[in-house]
Image (tube, rainbow, N blue to C red):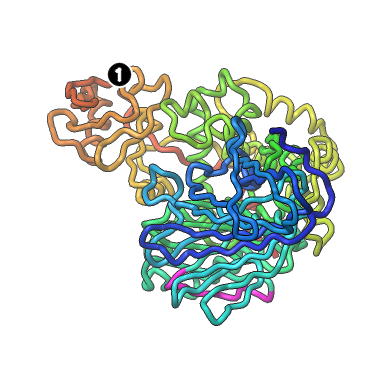
Amino acid sequence: MAIPEPLDLPYCGRLHVQVDATDLTRRIYQVRETIPVAGPGPLILLYPKWLPGYHAPQAPIELFAGLVVTAAGEEIDWTRHPVTVNAFQLEVPDGVTEIEARFQFLSPTAPDQGRVIAATNLFSLQWNTVLLYPAGHYARQIEVEAELKVPEGFAVACALSSERTDDGRFRFEATRLDVLVDSPVFAGRYARQVEIDGQVRLNLFADRPEWLDAAPEQIEAHAEVVRQCDRLFRSRHFDRFEMLVALSDELTGAGIEHHRSFEAVSIPDYFTGWDKTFARRDTVPHEYVHSWNGKHRRGAGSWSPCFEEPIRNDLMWVYEGQTQYWCQLLCARSGLWTAAQTREALAQTAATYDMRPGSRWRPILDTTRDPIIAARAALPWTSWQRSEDYYSEGALIWLDVDTRIRELSGDERSLDDFASAFFGRNDGDWSTDTYVFDDVIDTLGAIAPFDWKGFFVDQLQAKRRGTPLGGIARGGYRLVYRDEPTSFLTSSETVFGTINHTFSLGLVLAKSGKISDVLWDGPAFAAGLTVGASVLGVNGRTFSADSLKQAIRDGREGSPIELLIKRGSEVGPVTIRYDGGLRYPHLERVEGVRPRLDEILAPLT
């Protein structure tokens, strides 16, 4: 069976999707879908596969079950494509104008099954998981009307307008298939909605009501993200925007962009542990920026006419790398982080990639293939294999660009000007406007003449030792190491439950002692340690964060670092040869150099 090429022609009718999400005990979504047909003959139905925001084929087809197709009450046999397993072929009988498909989406009940999206008191719904669509059409040419039934007492938030029916269903406005898939739903028993302004709303959901207890100044910092984006981009490419934020220890943590909303699943004490967990506050600005960078403006290779056509990720260093840069700036400019905390975050990023050796064999441009290569699966040697480094290392490249523009223009212009010129044009237009590499180069050249093409070819395609640190130097700082951690590193360890000695032993552990990362060619690597092993003891004492720190301190005096390691069922000693003491990255001010980094982090007025 051949899957027809998509055509930019209207489909013959409107799809009607009904989802029942009331079985949260078993996390099962029941689906009933009515699909109009043009006449008798073969029809191929597709389960969405290549999804915007995931940068890869992410159809959870393994969780799709129970498919029964009928027409006029009679069951129709279907056949799955032998290679394209998200495609189903059937034969429409004579005289039939519509068919009905019934099936279930079996949402994961444990993390090893996939992203957990449903819990007792809240859930999220991604429309791509609960629909089939006819092959042969652009997604924008298929209209869909959707309904959702939720448990009694649940609030619902979505970028699509909806009305509640008497039987507890939410009926959403009819829209195009591509818009529906880009408009997820959050729903929950405990919810709070905050109007940021007439177009933007912060929707908070939580497993427990007390986790929604946000102080006014905490809400104000999120509102300032919106205002700072207005000043940065000088436009809005949406008619409304719904920030969908869940605070949960049951759902899988996530941050996924959409044009008129985003999905963010964060830690339960996001508000109640505000001072200790600030390292997790960057999700909201990152996903909000994507409405401009990634949704309204998108690399041409990352756009496809339907969810079956593959995408190309060559420009992810703009889509994600520059978004990561703006995200950190917005954290500082909005007050989600202080300027000092932002510099600490930058120091940690710079030090991490400066030590990782993967750039010796693999250029950063090649990491734009990682969403397809690895699909964010755990890796044994991340520092050597590399993993979507276009995000954070890409941000370092954009810091270099920003400070370079400032230097070239006598500090009259900056990357802020690129943001408004490139992403901010056509205020009020919320279509997708694609671009290519030369569009980026031309816009930068109009702001500050320079060989930007040669610059990016070198930065993206060359193999090198270390990471781009020119932006930090031009910003008036240098990367240094001290024996006390920054507050940002401490917050990161609190949030993720880790003990981070990347910059000394080349080792990251869980609080339990289980090793989660080993730096390739670092001291721990040389001693034969690997991810998955556990540290039981340190220099004859039971393992703890403090005992390991003390052993690293003692190592400066020549004392060996003796660990008791458990690998599988085996337990034995390991000696790490390291005498450099505790090392944590910091940014140190360079006297006599203009503090451009401080100027970059200052709020826009």
Magenta segment main secondary structure: strand
Comparing 553 with 420, the one in front is 420
From what the image shows, is residue 474 above or below residue 132?
above
Residue at image coords 62%, 20%: 463
Residue projecting furthest to the bottom = 166
Location of residue 451 in the rendering, given as x and y in whole percent from the top left corner: 81, 30
Location of residue 293 in the rendering, given as x and y in whole percent from the top left corner: 70, 50
Residue segment shown in magenta:
188-198
The quarter of the image holding the N terminus is: top right
From what the image shows, is residue 134 above or below residue 530?
below
Amino acid type at circle 1 is Ala
The residue that disc 1 covers is 527
Location of residue 216 in the rendering, given as x and y in whole percent from the top left corner: 49, 75
Residue at image coords 59%, 69%: 223
- Residue 269 lies in the magenta stretch: no
- Residue 194 lies in the magenta stretch: yes
Q: Residues within 10 Å of mark 1 (few under 14, many from 20)?
A: few
Kindly tell me whether residue 301 is visible in this rendering.
yes
